[in-house]
Image (spheres, rainbow, N blue to C red):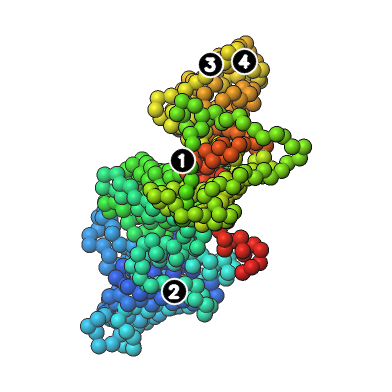
Amino acid sequence: MTVSRIRLLSEATVNRIAAGEVIERPAAAARELVENALDAGATRIAVSIAGGGIERIEVADDGLGMTGDELALSVLRHATSKLSDDQLVRIDTLGFRGEALPSIGAAARLAITSRTAGAENAATITVEGGAVSAVTPAPGGVGTRVVVRDLFYATPARRKFLKSARAETDAVETAVRRLALAAPGVAFRFETDGRVAFDLPRQDRAGRIAALLGAEAAGALLPIDATRGEMRLTGFACAPTVTRATAAAQTLIVNGRPVADPLLRTAVRVAYRDVIAMGRHAIVAVFLDLPAEDVDVNVHPAKAEVRFREADSVRGLVIGGLGRALSGGAGPAAPLVMEARQFQSRPPMRLGGGGRPVSAGFAEARLPLADTPSARTLPAPDRFHGPFTAEAPPRGYSSGDFPLGAPLAQVLDTYIIAVAADGSLVLVDQHAAHERLTHEALRGQLLEGGVRSQPLLLPAVVDMAASDCIRLMEHAPVLGRLGLEIEAFGPGAILVRALPAALGAPEPKPLLRDLADELAEQDETTALDARLDAVIARMACHGSIRAGRRLAGPEMDALLRQMEATPRAATCSHGRPTFLKLSRAEIERLFGRR
């Protein structure tokens, strides 16, 4: 008789294996318990952990609570109060699987105490390694208190692969913070090893986001509000010079549920790609609300990923909504520019001729060259009594008219020093700033039908590698829309007949070389608009005033005024900041006066 090599696992083993899918680390257990509290209608939730949540997790809430009979059912696998039918089509609660409590009970020592509003006393139940106790009376207020001890003591293999207590603590805090962001109308308290990490009252959304993202991010929040059909995107995005090294500060919430969805993360990255440096990540808290039947949350036991019925519409809404939020000029909404007090200034100057916005038409007036770099000061404007004070504004001016202030000097022939009305010191990188202005001017012309070109008096022949010539000629129609007219001139040369007028008269060879490199980094999957914008950014770099170029006072003033009126002017085309602003408090702190 042959002995079967296949055997049925015991129920306890099956439950422990299943527990690993739902509760892979302490943060997952804490998240499931807080989600239960939110689904129960809690207005106050307190979370306390010890030893990274491995030793102990406690979640207490003032929600609806459970009766003794409900308590007994709550620890059974796939028992839930959150599904009205078995179709899984319209899920409008955070939990619905009925797996969290039995999974925790299979891997740890679990104790639940709960009381409903009409009950004479609370009831309690315990589960240790899958062994369930009887329900017994207990003292306790209305709501539910869940205590988890010795997480994964029953599954030592899982416990062995946990990270350090510090890393697990950070993960739990991140999970709770995201849920607190998703539910600002609920008071949240979080303690770790006896230390209060945050204690937040019930707040509006803006207040909760400002409280959890930190002072730096709170000072740079840009509101989001966009709709498409029955979908609505709201929340806040940080201005592009306030970034992080990772995407950990991105909170993406779908119908009240924090998710880590790749489609949404990609949409955020695309929306920010032109305004932040490579390798940096935006800070956002976005709330996407759509009909429950249009999103599938039953993708993975962790419920961190979702699927959308109309993924393209969702992607377009997120990219468009964030893009509009980021499209303001370098005014009060810019990251390092606080609200300016009123002050007098001459009317803004337009750069270039014919009423065109910023281009290579900077006036050629220059001061005599010096042998070494120097700081050149301009005559003090009448509007200032001294270098850091402003007169009362004339009638008709309002706060924020000129947030970047009045130019006072040029340092190292590269940086413009200006003073804002509130005494803040503004330092502008002239090349980075003009690069963004040129970029937006080219983009605007493209959207209006095509970039205006300037024919060369004598066509220029540019010798290049044959592969680069082929690549450029393959994109000749696209480059023509951008004002760059080229023709093949033998196997290893390009004939340039016209350049974009907004670039002035850059050297064709460096421009074509960089464009060839830019196009080489892209492939056929890159969207046309992305390719166009990348080429525009490269052109803008070549058509901007360079570091080391001396500017006259009117040129400096015109540059600042154009920055204030130009979208996304807080960063250059490559995501670097175009200006820095130091308030009086920041200057005093640098000098140790505070």
Depth check, front residue: 320 or 349: 349
Q: Is residue 208 above or below residue 58?
A: above
User: Pointers 3 and 1 in contact (CB under 8 A)?
Assistant: no
User: Pointers 1 and 4 in contact (CB under 8 A)?
Assistant: no
Give the alpha-carbon distance from disc 2 to disc 3, as whole Å.
65 Å
Question: Residue 73 appears at what percent x and percent y?
Answer: 30, 74
Residue at image location 73% in from the left, 41% down from the top: 373
Q: Nearer the viewer, mark 4 or mark 3?
A: 3
Secondary structure at badge 1 equals loop
In this image, 138 relative to 241: left or right? left
**Mark 3 vs 1, N-terminal side:** 1
Give the alpha-carbon distance from disc 4 to disc 3, as whole Å.
11 Å
Position of the C terminus, as image quadrant, is bottom right
Give the alpha-carbon distance from disc 2 to disc 4, as whole Å.
67 Å
Depth check, front residue: 430 or 121: 430
Type of amino acid under label 4: Ala
Q: Nearer the viewer, mark 1 or mark 4?
A: 1
Mark 1 residue crowding within 10 angstroms, few (<14) / some (14–19) / many (20+): few
Taking the image as drawn, is residue 363 in sight?
Answer: yes
Q: Nearer the viewer, mark 3 or mark 1?
A: 1
Which residue corresponds to mark 4? 460
Check residue 199 in the rendering and tell me which mark sits there, or answer none: 2
Which residue corresponds to mark 1? 347
Type of amino acid under label 2: Asp
Question: Residue 416 appears at what percent x and percent y?
Answer: 61, 44
Give the alpha-carbon distance from disc 3 to disc 1, as whole Å.
33 Å
Check residue 455 in the rendering and tell me which mark sits there, or answer none: 3
For this orientation, the residue located farthest to the right is: 371
